[in-house]
Image: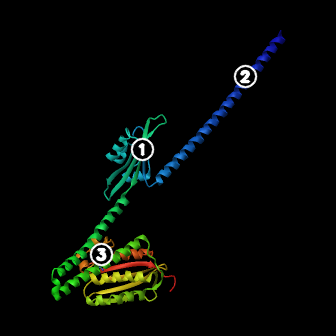
């Protein structure tokens, strides 16, 4: 009997040990499994975070502005360009489109996507303090797989530069037409006067033929300048670069201007150091110097002085200067002096036969050499143009 009890006790102990062992194993397996799941989840989350970061970085690098809006109408993502366009104070995420952009037109666009699948090529004008921006907006409604509305994506493309170029082009065409029409109408009316009987009087004939010749020359100059500018713009101009001794180049240009200088009693002075040399196209450089010297004589002081100077700027560059002691360029005109057809004094320029393209050509030619040009001017000091050019490797 006792033996049976002992046997049963042993059996019970063995059974409970087996149960405990089995439970323990189950618990361990479960724990191992849970750990694995947690590790997997952490890895997945890290992957998603990295992916979101990559996407955000990619969006931020885009020149287009992007807004992603959730189904609740609140911004989920605004890239750097969008933030800059609308000057959004951070954080953009979580705010409504109207709150972030402060632009009813953009908010209205998002609202339109309640009923429309997309809004394409909408033009938006943003009047800023410093400038007006023009944006092209494309907006697309987002849907879930089940077809439910799930917010929108709005893309802003900056058209400001394009608009500006278009305005410049239109202004240029208007200016060219005006510049061509003026001498043409003078030629036409002089010709009509001659046809209408003026030619019977030799004095009248000589005077009107003079007018015709003067304005035909002006037209030729204008067309030459326009063609040169077009070639410079398109990069179709070939630069025959070589080491150019600058004192000689300045002297050639000054010699060419001697007659004109004499007519205004202007003294010409070459102060370019003998050793100075630029890597330049000699013909084009002569044209640059001729333009600046002509202007200095034309707009400088009658009986004044025009000085061409120069110096080395380190080992890589040289600087050439053309200085006069004239009345200077008005401060409000200084910033525009290199624009096509811009003249500080229109009447004076026309009377001197200027096309208004000289400085634009000078700037283009200097830049085609890899150089730059600037001007300093004041009523007391006169005007001085500074040209930087690459130094010649050796002369
Ligand atoms: P333009 O054919 O009228 O001379 P430019 O492009 O050469 O055209 O010059 C543009 C304008 O810049 C001139 O009309 C003139 O008003 C001004 N300007 C150029 N050089 C000088 C100067 N040395 N002093 C004063 N004004 C100048």
Q: Position of residue 273 (x, y in %)?
A: 42, 88
Residue at the farthest top position: 1
Q: Quadrant of the N terminus?
A: top right
Query: Which labelled disc corresponds to residue 19?
Result: 2
Q: Could you tell me which secondary element the residue under label 3 belongs to?
A: loop
Q: Nearer the viewer, residue 129 or 205?
A: 205
Q: Position of residue 313 (x, y in %)?
A: 45, 79
Q: Nearer the viewer, residue 43 or 339?
A: 339
Q: Nearer the viewer, residue 382 or 114?
A: 114
In the image, residue 193 sits, relative to residue 130, either above or below, namely below
Other-residue count near label 3 (Cα within 10 Å), few / some / many at <14 / 14–19 / ≥20: many
> Dot 3 corresponds to which residue?
356
The answer for how far apart the CA atoms under marks 1 and 3 are is 49 Å
> Dot 1 corresponds to which residue?
140
In the image, residue 33 sits, relative to residue 293, either above or below, namely above
Some atom of ligand 1 lies within 8 Å of the CB belonging to the residue at label 3: yes
Which is nearer the N-term, disc 2 or disc 1? 2
The answer for how far apart the CA atoms under marks 2 and 3 are is 104 Å
Which is nearer the N-term, disc 1 or disc 3? 1
In the image, residue 72 sits, relative to residue 375, either above or below, namely above
Q: Could you tell me which secondary element the residue under label 2 belongs to?
A: helix
Q: Could you tell me which secondary element the residue under label 1 belongs to?
A: strand
Other-residue count near label 1 (Cα within 10 Å), few / some / many at <14 / 14–19 / ≥20: some
* Quarter of the render that holds ligand 1: bottom left
């Amino acid at each position: 009997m006792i033996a049976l009890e002992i046997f049963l006790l042993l059996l019970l102990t063995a059974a409970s040990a087996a149960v405990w062992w089995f439970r323990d194993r189950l618990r361990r397996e479960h724990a191992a499994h849970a750990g694995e799941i947690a590790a997997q989840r952490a890895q997945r989350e890290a992957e998603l975070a990295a992916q979101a970061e990559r996407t955000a970085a990619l969006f931020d690098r885009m020149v287009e502005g992007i807004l992603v809006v959730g189904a609740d109408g609140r911004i989920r993502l605004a890239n750097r360009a969008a933030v800059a366009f609308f000057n959004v104070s951070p954080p953009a995420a979580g705010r409504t489109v109207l709150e972030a952009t402060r632009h009813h037109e953009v908010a209205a666009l998002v609202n339109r996507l309640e009923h429309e699948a997309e809004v394409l090529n909408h033009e938006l004008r943003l009047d800023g303090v410093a400038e007006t921006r023009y944006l092209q907006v494309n907006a697309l409604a987002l849907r879930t797989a089940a077809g439910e509305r799930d917010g929108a994506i709005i893309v802003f493309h900056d058209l400001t530069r394009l608009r500006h170029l278009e305005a410049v082009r239109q202004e240029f065409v208007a200016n060219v037409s005006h510049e061509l029409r003026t001498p043409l109408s003078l030629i036409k009316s002089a010709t009509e006067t001659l046809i209408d009987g003026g030619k019977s009087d030799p004095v009248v004939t000589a005077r009107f033929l003079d007018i015709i010749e003067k304005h035909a020359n002006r037209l030729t100059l204008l067309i030459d300048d326009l063609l040169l500018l077009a070639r410079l713009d398109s990069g179709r101009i070939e630069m025959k670069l070589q080491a150019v001794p600058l004192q000689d180049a300045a002297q050639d240009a000054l010699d060419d201007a001697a007659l004109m200088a004499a007519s205004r009693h202007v003294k010409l002075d070459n102060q370019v150091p003998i050793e100075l040399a630029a890597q330049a196209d000699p013909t084009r450089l002569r044209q640059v110097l001729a333009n600046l010297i002509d202007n200095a004589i034309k707009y400088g002081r009658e009986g004044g002085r025009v000085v061409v100077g120069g110096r080395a700027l380190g080992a890589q560059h040289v600087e050439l200067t053309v200085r006069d002691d004239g009345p200077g360029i008005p401060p409000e005109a200084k910033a525009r002096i290199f624009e096509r057809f811009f003249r500080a004094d229109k009447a004076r320029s026309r009377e001197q036969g200027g096309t208004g393209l000289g400085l634009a050509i000078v700037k283009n030619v200097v830049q085609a050499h890899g150089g730059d040009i600037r001007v300093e001017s004041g009523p007391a000091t006169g005007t001085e143009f500074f040209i930087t050019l690459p130094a010649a490797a050796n002369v």
